Image: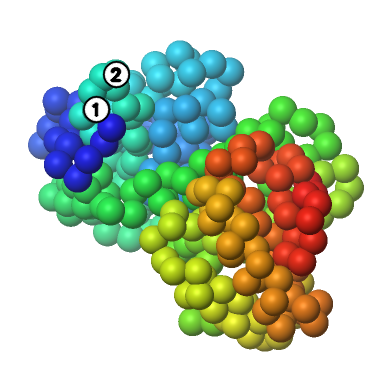
Amino acid sequence: MTTRHSRVRNSGRRPGPAVADVAGELRRLTPRDRWLCELLHEHQVLATEHVAALAFDTVHTARNRLNLLGHRHVLARFRDCVRPGSQAWRWTLGWVGASYIAARDGKPNPRLGSVADRINRLSASPRLAHLLGVNGLFVDLAAHARNSAHAALSVWWSERTCHAHTADLAHPDGHGVWTEHGRTIGFWLEYDTGSEPAHRVVAKLDGYTRLRRASGQPHAVLFHLQTARQEQSLHARLAAHPAVTGGELLVATASSERGGHPAGRIWRPAGHSGRLR
């Protein structure tokens, strides 16, 4: 079990080379490597299993490539000490990967110390589990679409990109556009870990109502909870919100405890007893 006092384990290497031939490293990056750098720039951190599900045929193949990119400082990895067993490595941009993003965007090369500081802050962040939960849900959708001829996740925004579009009207944890069997739905995701009281979570609908009116986009608002009890309590409150009773917002809930794949029939629309895809 991971605790606040778990020691962070790293790969045992320096956070980056003293002198690096960045141009030489960039020439060695495959299109998939560059795509992975761009994905981690947008979403900050992914576990080994996430990367495997998104872009590789097996976890073993993904692990080998990730380790190679880590050795070349394109990526960096960290994990907590856990007993018994071991925690999956978490991957983020290393110094060379961050240099690639800077070159792509026409920005100055990042300082080695700044990249190391960012990695350390991320590994110790109290929001790391929340971030991995959000990313994990989108990875599940993307992996499902990767193996289906009838599904696609055409948009996947991070919290940062969401805020650039929603300003202070709403603060979603992520945004996606999902298509399956010819039907498309855009959605905002609220991934709740139980750290906020229910009344504060319900109050978020006020912001989504304002966003709906300002943007004209009829995106659904999906609340993902941890336990079935939390979901039931929140569901009753959401169903009574004026934006739901008036039909202005489509709101649905799901929970980790109930299980099921996010592309499956796990979402319960507010005010209804059944669950939909």
Residue 184, position as x, y percentages in the image: 81, 55
In the image, what residue type sits under mark 2? Gly
Residue furthest toward the top?
Answer: 60
Q: Nearer the viewer, residue 224 or 217?
A: 224
In the image, what residue type sits under mark 1? Val
On screen, residue 138 versus residue 186, left or right, reads left
On screen, residue 265 versus residue 10, left or right, reads right
Residue 270's place in the image compared with 214, above or below, is above
Q: Quadrant of residue 260?
A: top right
Residue furthest toward the right?
Answer: 182
Instruction: Report, in whole angstroms, how far the alpha carbon at label 1 lies from the one at label 2.
Output: 6 Å
Residue identifier under label 1: 82
Total numbered badges shown on the rendered structure: 2
On screen, residue 272 versus residue 9, left or right, reads right
On screen, residue 204 versus residue 245, left or right, reads left
Residue 119, position as x, y percentages in the image: 23, 46
Which dot marks residue 85? 2
For image coordinates 71% across by 36% down, the residue present is: 145
Mark 1 in CB contact with mark 2 (< 8 angstroms)? yes
Residue 259's place in the image compared with 200, above or below, is above
Visible residue check, residue 276? yes
For image coordinates 56% across by 28% down, the residue present is: 53
Bin the neighbour count of mark 2 within 10 Å (Cα to Cα): few under 14, some 14-19, many 20 and up.
few
For image coordinates 82% across by 44% down, the residue present is: 180
Residue at disc 2, secondary structure = loop
